Image (cartoon, helix red, strand yellow):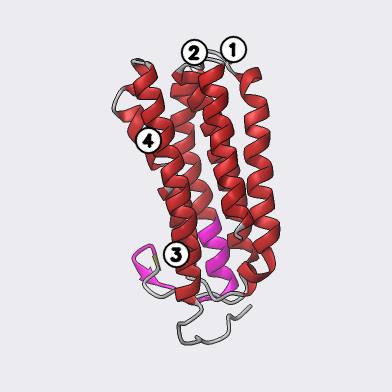
Amino acid sequence: MDISFVSLVLANLITIYAAVTENWDFSTVFGAYFFQSLIIGVFSLLKILDLKNFSTTGYMIGGHAVEPNEGTKRETAFWFVFVYGFFHACYAFVIFQGGFAWLPSTVPVIAVFFVNHLISYLLNKKQDSERRQNIGRAMFFPLARIIPMHLAIASGAFLAPNLGALTFFMALKMGMDLVMHEAEHLQDEVDTQEKPSVQPAA
């Protein structure tokens, strides 16, 4: 049994249940998912920094191929923080302009998301750090998980809250979470089958 997958399903179901029973509006839902997204970003950064033996196949920085070394890892971590942070600064501008009245009701759900991602990180930390992953995929997978939030804001759903739109958004968000979780682990299996590269230089 994939405990991290099960905990992810439960975290999303708890969020949907809280939203329906407490009659959340879109600002509250987006607030909860915004903090989940930040949590994903923090643990994704830790996973990048934990990498020991990784591949840079097809990965470039500034239009140039890079070697699998510590310098590449640090630069990748920097660009991940920059890009991820830029997206979330934009989201924060939309979400927080109406105030923070929604925050108290989302704290339990945010805590559930944190525990979910902490469990996943701790369960997979050793094998993730030693598995030969592609560092480019490790950087871009978390960005793909925020697509539903981006689409919902861009489509104006934030400005026209209703039960149908709310349900659709949360189902889309949960589906993307589960798909990306499985895709990430499937890619890990593919990466382990790649031919070894030169051991990263310090």
Q: Which residue is mark 2?
A: 98
The three-letter amino acid code for the residue at tag 4 is His
Q: Residues within 10 Å of mark 4 (few under 14, many from 20)?
A: some
Nearer to us of marks 3 and 1 is 1
Above or below 200: residue 173: above
For marks 3 and 2, the one nearer the N-term is 2
**SS under mark 4:** helix
The three-letter amino acid code for the residue at tag 2 is Gly
In the drawing, what numbered circle is on residue 150?
A: 4
In the drawing, what numbered circle is on residue 124?
A: none
Q: Tell me which residue sits at (45%, 30%) in the image.
A: 91
Relative side of 177 to 47, left or right: left
For marks 4 and 1, the one nearer the N-term is 1
Q: Residue furthest left?
A: 155
The reply to whether callout 4 and callout 3 are in contact (CB within 8 Å) is no
Q: Quadrant of residue 108?
A: top right
Q: Quadrant of residue 87?
A: top left
**SS under mark 3:** helix
For marks 3 and 1, the one nearer the N-term is 1
Assign the C terminus to one quadrant of the image.
bottom right
For marks 2 and 4, the one nearer the N-term is 2
The reply to whether callout 2 and callout 1 are in contact (CB within 8 Å) is yes
Q: Nearer the viewer, residue 37 or 80?
A: 37
In the drawing, what numbered circle is on residue 101?
A: 1
